Amino acid sequence: MRKELERYFRKDKLPHIWCPGCGHGIITGAVIRAIDNLKLDQNKICIVSGIGCSSRAPGYMNFNTLHTTHGRALAFATGIKMANPELKVIVLTGDGDCAAIGGNHLIHAARRNIDITTIVFNNSIYGMTSGQYSPMTPKGAFATTAPYGNIDRNFDLCKLAQSAGATYVARGTVYHVPQLIKLIEKALKHKGFSFVDVADICPTYFGRKNKVPTPVAMMEKIRDMSITVKTAEKLSAEELSGKIVIGEFYEENALEFTEEYAKIIKTAQGGK
């Protein structure tokens, strides 16, 4: 780690307690590098998390941070942004935290187009609570709660966010780190609800249960499964099966919620 990045960490909280080979540290590092590249004011950033392995990240990060209840990170983040619109509010969440109990909050934060950046640590499993399957666990994959294979269909979080109203939507991976940093930078600069889904790895539970023996093998699998948005456009649905499509999916300039709400306050106070 570059010496100048140390100021973004609470060094007294390190070393972290993530499992060896976990991809969460890679995503956390990408967030830190994106913030540093953009020269954002450290004191005007608030990072919010819910519950899960990913939600430990803000505890290591030297910003205004809030560790909230399961699935409610976006609800708390909405309150923070409404109370102080000048803050750059970032939500770090896992696939279970965001797509399961927090799914309704995701939909409505996107619908409002509130200026929050949401980054999903998507390792396709509930890692902190012993490896139950999540809404993002692929059909047929194994988990502690799916010992004979998961029969649920997973869904595309990026398509969900876009259809709900998010105005910046992208996906990166823990293998393609330079691209991931750039995607997070774009998300942070965007005015409105921005969403970055990150294909992540959990060697302890997902890898072990699904016979991907090492973190390196999991990273190689992500590499081999990943294709760009442009490549995906040329493929059939059958050819896309099992692929991870990465890159920018959608960007739009639209009215942002806190700015619209400020107009209502001004009108209510007798302004024009």
Image (cartoon, rainbow, N blue to C red):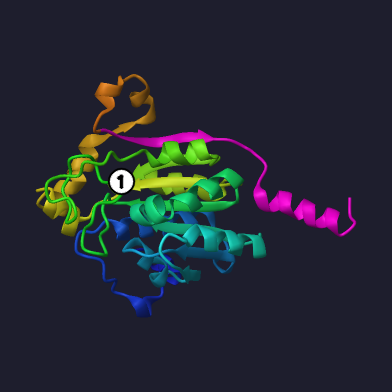
Please give the count of numbered marks on the rendered protein: 1
Is residue 18 among what the camera can see? yes
Outermost residue to the bottom: 12
How far across and down, in percent of the image, does residue 75 sit? 53, 60
Q: Quadrant of the N terminus?
A: bottom left
Residue at horizontal 61 percent and vertical 60 percent from the top: 81
Is 265 drawn above or below residue 14 in the view shown? Answer: above
Is 237 drawn above or below residue 110 in the view shown? Answer: above
Left or right position of 207 against 165: left
Residue marked by disc 1: 136
Disc 1 is placed on an element classified as loop
Q: Image quadrant of residue 13? A: bottom left
Determine crowd level at label 1: few under 14, some 14-19, many 20+ residues with C-alpha closer than 10 A: many
Is 151 drawn above or below residue 94 in the view shown? Answer: above
Residue at horizontal 43 percent and vertical 36 percent from the top: 159
Q: Image quadrant of residue 11? A: bottom left
How far across and down, in percent of the image, does residue 234 sit? 34, 19
How far across and down, in percent of the image, does residue 238 sit? 25, 22
Is residue 84 among what the camera can see? no
Left or right position of 240 against 265: left
Q: Is residue 57 magenta?
A: no
Q: Nearer the viewer, residue 99 or 26?
A: 99
Q: Is residue 252 magenta?
A: yes
Amino acid at dot 1: Met
Left or right position of 150 against 166: left
How far across and down, in percent of the image, does residue 142 sit? 15, 48
Residue at horizontal 18 percent and vertical 41 percent from the top: 221
Left or right position of 255 against 224: right
Task: Please report the bounds of the magenta region as a residue range.
Answer: 243-272
